[in-house]
Amino acid sequence: MISEIELKKYWDTYYERLILFAKRFGVPDSYAQDLVVDVFVRVWKYGQEDKNVTTLLFTSTKNACLDYFRSGTNHYKEYQEWMDEIEDVIVYGTLLEGFVIAAAYEMAKKSTNEGRIFNLI
């Protein structure tokens, strides 16, 4: 078992790198963070001090990423739902922006000075 002091040293050194490593596999950011935390917990519980901990961390992260994608369609479904929500926000935001611009145009058109500017455009 690796000591807490050593684990903290590895955490400070490799946590961000491992998240980026997981994201390169295509794992979303929030899952990548959870994955890396799980890897650190497993390495802390089962890792041995005489082993190359750096290699163990990266290999475990790679395997966790592969397991993430092997686990089935749950992640794909969650990802698709998230993308649908983002698309809705973009569509509604674009519609709202169009309404705001149209309302501003109508207000400016009613005023004499600003209306002339808008009519020139």
Image (cartoon, rainbow, N blue to C red):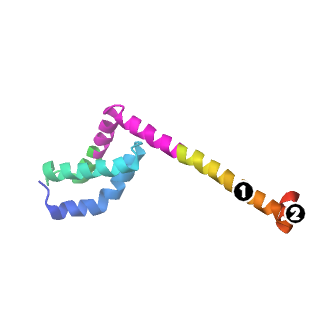
The disc placed on residue 116 is 2
**On screen, residue 21 above or below 12:** above
Task: Please state the extent of the stretch shown in magenta in the rendering.
Answer: 61-87
* The disc label shown at residue 28, or none: none
* Image quarter of residue 109: bottom right
Q: What residue appears at the point 13 percent right and 60 percent down from the top-left corner? A: 3
Question: x and y percent of residue 70 in the render?
Answer: 32, 32
Residue 106 in percent (x, y) is at 77, 57
Q: Is residue 60 magenta?
A: no
Q: Earlier in the sequence, mark 1 or mark 2?
A: 1
The amino acid beneath tag 1 is Ala
What is the quadrant of residue 71 in the picture?
A: top left
Q: Could you tell me which secondary element the residue under label 2 belongs to?
A: helix
Q: Is residue 84 magenta?
A: yes
The residue carrying mark 1 is 103
Of the two numbered discs 1 and 2 in the rendering, the one whose residue sits closer to the viewer: 1
Amino acid type at image mark 2: Arg
Relative depth, front residue between 81 and 106: 106
The local crowd at label 1, few if under 14, some if 14 to 19, many if 20 or more residues have their Cα within 10 Å, is few
Give coordinates of residue 92: x percent, y percent: 58, 47
Give percent across and percent down for residue 49: 14, 55
Of helix, strand and loop, which one carries label 1?
helix
Left or right, 112 with respect to 35, comes to right
